[in-house]
Amino acid sequence: KNEVEQSPQNLTAQEGEFITINCSYSVGISALHWLQQHPGGGIVSLFMLSSGKKKHGRLIATINIQEKHSSLHITASHPRDSAVYICAVRVDSNYQLIWGAGTKLIIKP
Amino acid sequence: EAQVTQNPRYLITVTGKKLTVTCSQNMNHEYMSWYRQDPGLGLRQIYYSMNVEVTDKGDVPEGYKVSRKEKRNFPLILESPSPNQTSLYFCASSLSAYNSGANVLTFGAGSRLTVL
């Protein structure tokens, strides 16, 4: 079993829909990252969370430390949100990063 | 502009011919790391460095070497490349790995390597 599991693996939605991508982990962490990788390949850090909730524009990230679960939400989704979204956790015992496999999101106009 | 710069962006080489992919950051970051990304496998860590002269193996270090002689540079060395090292490589850095408030990652643009 992977230590970081993302769901769904693939998600196709219509423009304007509310999107939720989930990340569950099984190790103790000091922080959780959400990143976005566009079709061109570049990777951009969206959020880094250690507790609670963060919001940036139409993106919201939440984390529940007790349940070892995080969600990334996109409100009023747009075709330019189409990308792979990756969750990664910083292990608190050795500072290593463990990566999820990514969620491929396609937003259709 | 704060950034992580990788070179080359694209390289085609032949088996056994030593090559180096450079990575440089201008943000005075302590933590630097190399990843490879292969279809269906996501990002896998090759090596990382917590600070100057401190490097550690990641998940897939075989066939690679790194050095961290100065804070800004973290080159990835393939002494004798093989076709299974054909991949997309990313360098990343963060201010610190220890302080969870300071470890937002900045990625380079990626280096696509093909070994024939």
Image (cartoon, rainbow, N blue to C red):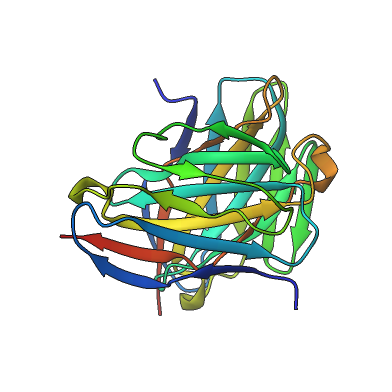
Residue found 75% across the figure and 46% down from its top: B103
Q: Is residue A90 left or right of residue A104?
A: right
Question: Would you place residue B25 above or below residue B94 in this image?
Answer: below
Which quadrant is home to the N terminus of chain A?
top left
Q: Is residue B101 left or right of residue A69?
A: right
Residue A8 shows in this picture: no
Residue B5 shows in this picture: yes
| Location of residue A107 in the rendering, given as x and y in whole percent from the top left corner | 42, 70
- Examine the image and state in which quarter residue A97 appears: top right
Which quadrant is home to the C terminus of chain A?
bottom left
Q: Which is nearer the eye, B100 or B33?
A: B33
Q: Is residue A82 left or right of residue A47?
A: left
Residue found 52% across the figure and 39% down from its top: B47
| Location of residue B6 in the rendering, given as x and y in whole percent from the top left corner | 53, 67
- Examine the image and state in which quarter residue B72 appears: bottom right
| Location of residue B63 in the rendering, given as x and y in whole percent from the top left corner | 34, 39
Question: Would you place residue B99 above or below residue A26 in this image?
Answer: below
Q: Across the whole image, how many numbered discs are drawn on residues?
A: 0
Q: Which is nearer the eye, B82 or A104?
A: B82
| Location of residue B83 in the rendering, given as x and y in whole percent from the top left corner | 19, 51
Residue found 32% across the figure and 55% down from its top: B18
Residue found 67% across the figure and 49% down from its top: B69
